[in-house]
Image (cartoon, rainbow, N blue to C red):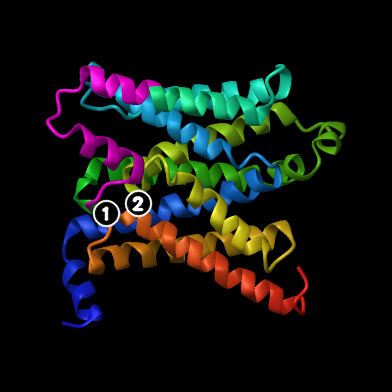
Amino acid sequence: MSAAEKIALYWAYPFVRYALVVGVLIALCASLLGVTLVLKRFSFIGDGLSHVAFGAMAVAAVLGLHNDMPLILGITVVCAILLLRTGQHAKIKGDAAIAMISVGALAIGYLLMNLFSTSSNLSGDVCSTLFGSTSILTLTETEVGLCVALSALVLLTFILFYNKIFAVTFDENFAKAVGIKVKFYNLLIAVMIAVVIVLAMNLVGSLLISALVIFPALSAMRVYQSFRTVTICAVLLSVCCAALGIFTAVLAGTPVGSTIVTVDMAAFLLFSIIGRLRLGGKV
């Protein structure tokens, strides 16, 4: 059976369509925010918040919550706000604050899962949470609907406040001078990335989420210069990599999250080569 025939066969199953919809939407939102985070030198926040989400998921599991999304989302958003304020005002700088909260949340989450877990396969549960589900059968119709709604909200927010986000990204002092509420828009960016990270956990796992934020943005920056062009390129590239990664995972039977990240890495290498060729071999 050819690859096209296999894809046509698997496409008849709802779980494949669910995974594709969720993967594309998460990749789109992550790449939109990724350009801003990379330019602000705050891209590591994705890694920190993903570990916070892991800790929140462990707390939800201990409490026996059937619907853990509100708790995980709430804790992650609060930590995003705390990270932003800590990095701006406290003696602990932004990168140190992210590292501290990241490691702390990861350790507490794993400790709670060991102390209170009733699962017979704790190692498998932890691995699935950290690196994404080994099967795409885990996505339910409710989760897909929630992902669509929240992704649409993130996308709409980014489009409505595009000019403000652009100004805050490149020059906060100038943005303040022209009357833009810099603190508010920094807070808005932090909340949006927290939402994307929580949505992405079921697909790629808490340890791989940063790749969806960073790789498309860095790839686009290797070839293009303007903010708008880089953003559009990053979105298109991220969506294509997510779709290709999902189809490859279905055909090869590999973990979805790891496969998508591997495709993103290959795209980065390709764009790096193209960028070097365009510059005549100059870095």
Element at label 1: helix
Query: What is the number of the mark on residue 31?
Result: none
Query: What is the number of the mark on residue 18?
Result: 1
> In front here: 122 or 155?
122
**Dot 1: within a 10 Å radius of its alpha carbon, few (fewer than 14), some, or many (20 or more) residues?**
some
Prevailing secondary structure class for the magenta stretch in the rendered image: helix
Q: Is residue 53 above or below residue 271?
A: above
Pinpoint residue 274: horizontal percent, then vertical percent.
64, 76
Point out the image quarter for the N terminus. bottom left
Identity of the amino acid at label 1? Tyr
Q: Residue at x 35, y 40 (%)?
A: 130
> In front here: 123 or 212?
123
Pinpoint residue 209: horizontal percent, then vertical percent.
45, 45
Q: Residue at x 27, y 47 (%)?
A: 133
* Residue tagged 2: 22
Pinpoint residue 131: horizontal percent, then vertical percent.
34, 45
Horizontal side, residue 123 vs residue 161: left or right: left
Tags 2 and 1 touching, CB below 8 Å: yes
Give the magenta part as a residue range. Answer: 108-135
Q: Is residue 137 magenta?
A: no
**Dot 2: within a 10 Å radius of its alpha carbon, few (fewer than 14), some, or many (20 or more) residues?**
many
Point out the image quarter for the C terminus. bottom right
Q: Dividing the picture into quarters, in which one does residue 279 lie?
A: bottom right
Identity of the amino acid at label 2? Val
Q: Is residue 119 magenta?
A: yes
> In front here: 136 or 210?
210
